[in-house]
Image (cartoon, rainbow, N blue to C red):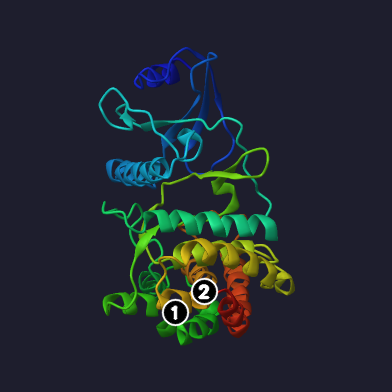
Amino acid sequence: MNSLNQIIEKFPEIKNVESVKPLTAGLINQTYLVTTQEGTPNFILQCINHNIFKNVDLLQNNIECVTSHIRKKLADAGETDLDRKVLRFAMADNGKTYYFDGEKYWRACVFVEGSVTLDTVTPESSYLVGLKFGEFEAMLSDMSCHLEETIPDFHNMEFRIKQLRDAVNANPVGRLDKVKDLVAEIEKDANNMCRAERYYREGLLPKRICHCDTKVSNMLFDKEGNVLCIIDLDTVMSSFIFSDYGDFLRSAANTGQEDDKNLDNVKFNFEIFKSFTKGYIESARCFLLPIEIDLLPFAVTLFPYMQAVRFLTDYINGDTYYQIKYPEHNYVRTLAQYKLYKETVAAIDDMRSYIETLI
């Protein structure tokens, strides 16, 4: 604990520390709650996972650009209590919002008092998630600061298809025979599923500032159920709006598990789709182009397809990326995500009809 106290001392704003306790939430970064004496704010201290986020200076610059832009917009709109409505990071004594101790990178942000997170996805919470993430994108739609990719090619479908083809050509552990029919099925739709990248190169489809990790647990609520702010900003970067819209529905609107062995459990929850879409369009339609709205059903199909490709690639490569619980885990994951993809494709006409009622 002495080492943590030494780290905390590098952030002069953190004063009168009473305790430092680890938090169990969060899978990527080591996180601690720093409790201070009454009258001074508490803080969240994080050790940034440098294995995932290779360029911490870039990472924090993205976050600073986003939070300062949102803070100014809220202030201009007459909002108060801004530290509860947008994250604020403490400056280290090196003049940056992070500190490098020679081995690890650290940052600290003000703890949002009285806040809670939700893990349960319901139509009600899905509507709030859609509304808030649409608002998040809308507030950043006029931001002049350029953001770099914190994880290059994170949601690039062309890149993911190339990875699959490279794995198929190498077949490093001899698993291709088992999945060659599935690979052929996936390849049939590859050209269509890569169209966003083509539209972008043709100047038809823009990239926006997106969160890229939309889930209900990445929002803070007050005890009355009102949304306070969006958290976990590590993946905020330039992307297609599909990254926020489609990825949420991939997990939230799946009636089964991501790795469900019983494919009969895997259905597309249309009520969750409707609630999330209603909230998203209410807040985002002010900046969305017609082509972006038209491609929202495509976005819903894109992310289970992309995840099936990623799981299958890892399976063929010998399980080198995702942690597995048993030898065929990535194969089971692939089948479950591909089933969800087929379910979403079957719902495209219904999705399109519903969206038309909202426009």
Please give left or right for residue 307 compared with residue 92 in the image. right
- Callout 2 crowding tier (Cα within 10 Å): few <14, some 14–19, many ≥20: many
Residue in the picture at 59% in, 48% down? 217
Residue 64 image point, x, y percent = 33, 41
Do tag 1 and tag 2 residues touch (Cβ < 8 Å)? Answer: yes
Please give left or right for residue 165 compared with residue 42 in the image. left
Between the C-alphas of marks 1 and 2, the distance is 8 Å
Question: SS class of the residue under badge 2?
Answer: helix
Q: Earlier in the sequence, mark 1 or mark 2?
A: 1
Residue 180 image point, x, y percent = 51, 82
State the residue in front, 48 or 115. Answer: 115
State the residue in front, 346 or 229. Answer: 229
- Report the disc number at residue 305: 2
Residue in the picture at 51% in, 36% down? 84
Residue in the picture at 49% in, 73% down? 299
- Report the disc number at residue 193: 1
Residue type at the position of mark 1 = Met
Residue type at the position of mark 2 = Tyr
70 above or below 183? Answer: above
Residue 65 image point, x, y percent = 32, 45
